[in-house]
Amino acid sequence: MQKRTFHFMFGKMFSCVILLMLVGFVKALPYQDTARLVKGKITGTDGAPIASASVIEKNTSNGTLTLIDGTFSIMPKSENATLVISAVGYANKEVQLTKEPFYLITLDATNNNLNEVVVIGYGTKRKVDLTGSVSTISTKDIENRPITQTSQALAGLTTGVTVSQGSGQPGNNGAGITIRGIGSYGAGGGPLILVDGLATSINDVDPNNIASISVLKDAASASIYGSRAANGVILIETKRGRAGKIQVNYSGYAGWQKATELADFVPAWQYATLRNEANKNMGGSATYTEEEIQKFKDQSDPDNYPDVAHYKDLLTSGSGFQSSHNVTFLGGNAMNRYVFSASYLTQDGIVTQNGYKRYNFMFNEDSKLTDNLTLKVSINGYTAKQHSPRQYDGGMNSMINFAVREGPVYAGEKSDGTYGYQDNYSPEAWLASGAFYQGSNNYFLGGAELIWKPFTGFSISGKAGYNFWSYYNKDYAADFQFDPNKYVGPNNLSVTSGQGEQLTLQSIATYNKVIGAHSFELLGGISEERYNDRFLTGYRKDFPTALLYELNAGGATGMTNGGSASEWSMRSYFSRFNYSYKDKYLFEANIRADGTSRFPSDGRWGYFPSFSAGWRLSEESFIKDHISWIDNLKIRGSWGKLGNQNIGTYPYQNIISLGQNYSLGGTLVSGAATTRLSNAAITWESTTTKDLGMDLDVLNGKFGLVVDLFDKNTTGVLYTVATSSVLGLGTSPVNVGSVKNTGFEAALTYRQSFGDLQIGLSPNFSYTKNRITSLANGLKEDIGSGLFVGQPIGIIYGYVADGLFVDDKDIASYATQPYSAEPGMERYKDISGPDGVPDGKVDATYDRTIIGNTVPKYTYGLTFNANYKGFDLYVLAQGLGGYEKQIGSYAAFAFYNGGQIQQWQVDNRWTEENPDPRAAYPKLTSLNMGSGAILTSTYWNRDASFLRIKSIQLGYTLPTTFVEKAKFSKVRLYFSGQNLFSWNHFYKGWDPEMGMSTGDNSQFYPLTSVYTFGINASF
């Protein structure tokens, strides 16, 4: 600990020394006469600043480039000089200088898309100058959608990014994000997320506050982030103020949610009838008489012969109401610009007693302290509260899973106030029990950056960032008396509390220089980060009352407590060099060195270089002078190395585990021991990426095409090698595996105007082939971990089904099955044996194989927008393809552990009257874990591919003459829908995108559709 603290403090001192050295260097430069220094700002016709525009004194090599805010300064050689202004996407302009000290210059657009400024690592760049693979998402792509977690926003909008939302639970409905395939089966971690340059979680930023999102997909764009960039980088910039009178913007919506899919379970009378059929198929007698079935049907005695749709009732018990409100104030002048935003979100679940509330704030300010000194401050945070019901031995999602199991023949609340139940489960009873979960979170992210520009082209900045989070959760399991014969208890309470923080210090120097047709940029920097996290837990039971939920009120018997903490620190050095000749030949090189406390001293430092180049063929005379309809044609290529340091906490150290009790003198005493063998040689997982791309824009920006081919190879993947039990210790993972991802991406854009009608269409498609290329010591497979060399991560391993047995003769003539086969049950193929050929016997050793993959190969999306005389329409479609899924036992199998039966199972079942060997469901029986009919096989695989209408938004902007009378500058009304429709071939009644594991304990919360009405107003 002392050693890491020393390194961190040394890093801070080193950053200060570098800063002082640079200041001294600048002060030592020769003094320049500024009497004839000319300054100005270049904007487009919309008033937006144009960055990296070329400003050259005519007939000389004297020139410069505009900064990100469009400003420039130049020392003309002649008093009557003429400046030639040029920028990609804009018509050239000449400006005759007078004695004015400042010039505001407006350029007419030819293709705005080419001049778009893109946020990259530690800076910005014109899109046309990029040599790496970077996708961008603007605020227009996500605004006014009922997005409660920012991770949902990326779905369908960009190539190479797989977004899957597994849950619709309020507060926990964020989506998983993968960039260009899964790169590791060892170290964890998704893409690195940076908000205003500071590392955090993507769901910790309010969607209302986002100005732009950049996705860095290849090594050329991401290697400057080194050891955390192997899984890609997502850069989020929040909104900033602008000069002008104060503007107030309000946006808000209100609406409701419902489950995207609900399974169709049969009513009680049909359940009873089919239960009898299942008993008959098993050689048993009927469970229900005809008179009892009639009572289920006519509901003459609902207490004893109920018909309760437990699952549907539970998932429609909540209001599903959702609303969001955001107010933003922005304004400023030439010296100070600011933006302040406050947001409120409330989301009631589709299950009663479940909800989420969040309050967000943001304050950003840009202050020009002097002509060459600027201070940027970025602050945002939130407080959130979440609550949900629970059952005795599980949370709300477990309650939903067991509601799937509970048949309609079990009562809910009876007329005498008691409850029906199956084992310990009854959603109605647990909703009435007072059991609950309550969670609260607080979050703060703040950064301040001081930027000094002592002379043209040179800047130096120092940045400090602080991230703080805390949480406090209560989980109360109530005891409950279902009826006189059934009690579950005792009551108990678990409390978890924790907090963490991350400190970032960063210094960067940049230098830009234009010499004739040559343009150079050099960036160098140093950063330090320190992270720590800690938590405490406590548990007690036997509370005297259900109205007091504090630990001290519980009994002392059986109480427990615990706690833990973790920390790490990192120091990094990075540099980037850019070169451009005539805006035609582009080159970039990056290097980063990371040292982290997570690794032993011998392997602590990792070095991550990248190189990329681009050739703008459209600037060559053979295209520029002869093919006028080509605006931009660029080919680019890159190579680079990235790292993954997400290996857990200090696996190179011998960890002492407590609770290792032993006998001393016949008395059992507490002790500690090393239970895991450390790995002193552990180091980074390393990813090498190659990318070849093409960018094409034609017809003055009407059409655009971006195509990429990539090859991503990860080596040193962490893998825990099996050892003999004689060792007596667990082992730490070692860097021995490798994974390869190759793929193709394409994105097309189309923009056109037809009088008052403007339309835009943007389809995109990505394909990624993932495969494990090595495990360890020549090992070809690890069945227990689901890892196979040559196969993708996330495979399904099981039997190959060959339909259903028709009769006893069919069974006798087929290979012997691994279970006691009967007509109407699955027959599994005999694919091999001890000698490598079929042996007439199906068993787990030789006849299981890879039968599917749970990770999508294809991602695709499409956006369509149209505007006509105040009306606007926005449509977003998203799809995932090339993968399969199986679902939980209660959802897939009829009568599993006494569970329910769905209508699709009834309609497609095998019967003696219709012994279809290709029936979609076998004959009805009573199933449980281990039943031969439900072994993992292709019979239960379902294609999980889907195409979803992710969002539709229809709006109308009121006429200006009308709203100005009410002192508004703009008012827009709209209707929006999220997760509206889905086309798929999955299990009927189940959403293929929804997360659900196989087996008994398949906890889940359905995805939800959201329908809202909203308003945007500015004044």
Image (cartoon, rainbow, N blue to C red):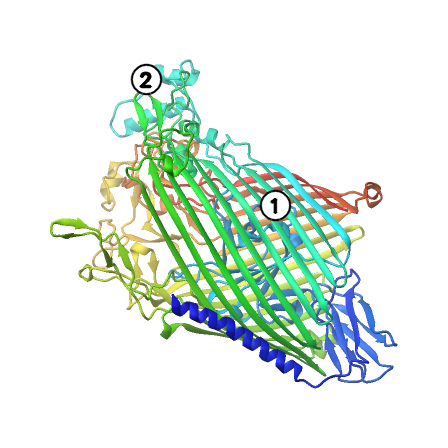
- Of 599 and 541, nearer the camera is 541
Q: Is residue 436 visible?
A: yes
- Residue type marked 2: Thr
Which quadrant holds residue 995? top left
- Of 710 and 346, nearer the camera is 346
x and y percentages locating residue 462 in the rendered image: 59, 69
Which quadrant holds residue 455? bottom right
x and y percentages locating residue 469 in the rendered image: 50, 52
Q: Is disc 1 placed on a helix, strand or loop?
A: strand
Sequence-earlier tag: 1 or 2 = 2
Q: Which residue is mark 1?
A: 951
Q: Residue at x 44, y 65 (%)?
A: 569
**Circles 1 and 2: CB atoms closer than 8 Å:** no
| 7 sits to left or right of 272 | right
Q: CA distance from mark 1 to mark 2?
A: 50 Å
Q: Is residue 688 visible?
A: no
x and y percentages locating residue 417 in the rendered image: 41, 19
424 lies above or below 840: above
Disc 2 packing (10 Å; few <14; some 14–19; many ≥20): few
| 601 sits to left or right of 343 | left
Q: Which residue is mark 2?
A: 289
Q: Is disc 2 placed on a helix, strand or loop?
A: loop
| 875 sits to left or right of 644 | right
Q: Residue at x 76, y 73 (%)?
A: 86
x and y percentages locating residue 255 in the rendered image: 62, 36
Q: Nearer the viewer, mark 1 or mark 2?
A: 1
- Of 292 and 727, nearer the camera is 727
Disc 1 packing (10 Å; few <14; some 14–19; many ≥20): many
Quadrant where the image shows the N terminus: bottom left
- Residue type marked 1: Ser
